[in-house]
Image (cartoon, rainbow, N blue to C red):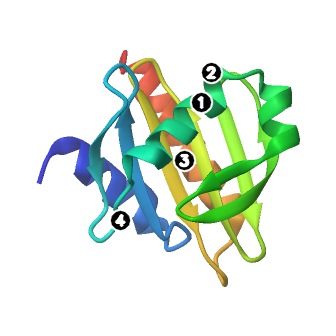
Amino acid sequence: MSHLQNLLLDTLLGTKHVDSAALIKLQEQSLCVASPGFSVMPSDVRTLVDGFAKNPLKTRREGLYFKEKDYKCVRADDYSLYAKSENTGVVVVKTHLYLLVATYTEGMYPSVCVEATEKLGEYLRRKGN
C-alpha cells in the first residue's frame, strides 16, 4: 500500500465517519488512490474538477451529479465543496496537486467527515501537495 493510500485509510476511514475516500490528481484529472471498493469514474472526476473550475456560486446553485446521484451543494468555495443527498454526502477538498474526496452514509456524522477531510487537505497543502 502506498503512503497516500495509508493516509486515506488511517486519517479518514479510521474515523468511522468516512465511508470511502479517494485522491484525484488535478493536473491529469485522474484517480491517484482510493479506498478499497471505491471507484471513481472519469465522468465523476470531471464533475468534481469542474466544480472547482466553475464559479463556486454556480456550483452551489446547480449542485453536483456524482456517482449516478444528484447532490445539493451546501458549500462551494475555492478550496472546498460539500454536497448532500438525503442521508449521504460528499466532501471535496482541493490542495495544490489533488482533490481529496470523502463520502459519508446514513448513521455517520457529516461534521466528523468534514473535519477529517479538511484536516488532511490542510496537511497535504502544508507538504506542498
Question: For the residues carrying marks 2 and 3, which lies nearer the camera in this image?
Answer: 2
- At x 82%, y 43%, the residue is 62
Q: Amino acid at mark 2?
A: Ala
Tell me the quarter of the picture where residue 118 sits. Answer: top right
Give me the C-alpha separation between circle 1 and circle 2.
Answer: 5 Å
Question: For the residues carrying marks 4 and 3, which lies nearer the camera in this image?
Answer: 4
Provide the secondary structure element on which disc 4 rests. Answer: loop
Q: Amino acid at mark 1?
A: Asp
Q: Amino acid at mark 3?
A: Thr
Which residue is the site of mark 2? 53
Dividing the image into 4 quarters, which one contains the N terminus? bottom left
Asked whether 84 or 11 is in front, the reply is 84
Question: For the residues carrying marks 3 and 1, which lies nearer the camera in this image?
Answer: 1
List the single residue furthest toward the left: 1
Provide the secondary structure element on which disc 1 rests. Answer: helix
Give me the C-alpha separation between circle 4 and circle 1.
Answer: 20 Å
Which residue is the site of mark 4? 38
Where 111 falls versus 120 (above or below)?
A: below
Q: Earlier in the sequence, mark 2 or mark 4?
A: 4
Give me the C-alpha separation between circle 2 and circle 4.
Answer: 24 Å
Q: Earlier in the sequence, mark 3 or mark 1?
A: 1
Dot 2: few (<14), some (14–19), or many (≥20) neighbours within 10 Å? few
Which residue is the site of mark 1? 50
Which residue is the site of mark 3? 117
Dividing the image into 4 quarters, which one contains the C terminus? top left
Dot 1: few (<14), some (14–19), or many (≥20) neighbours within 10 Å? some
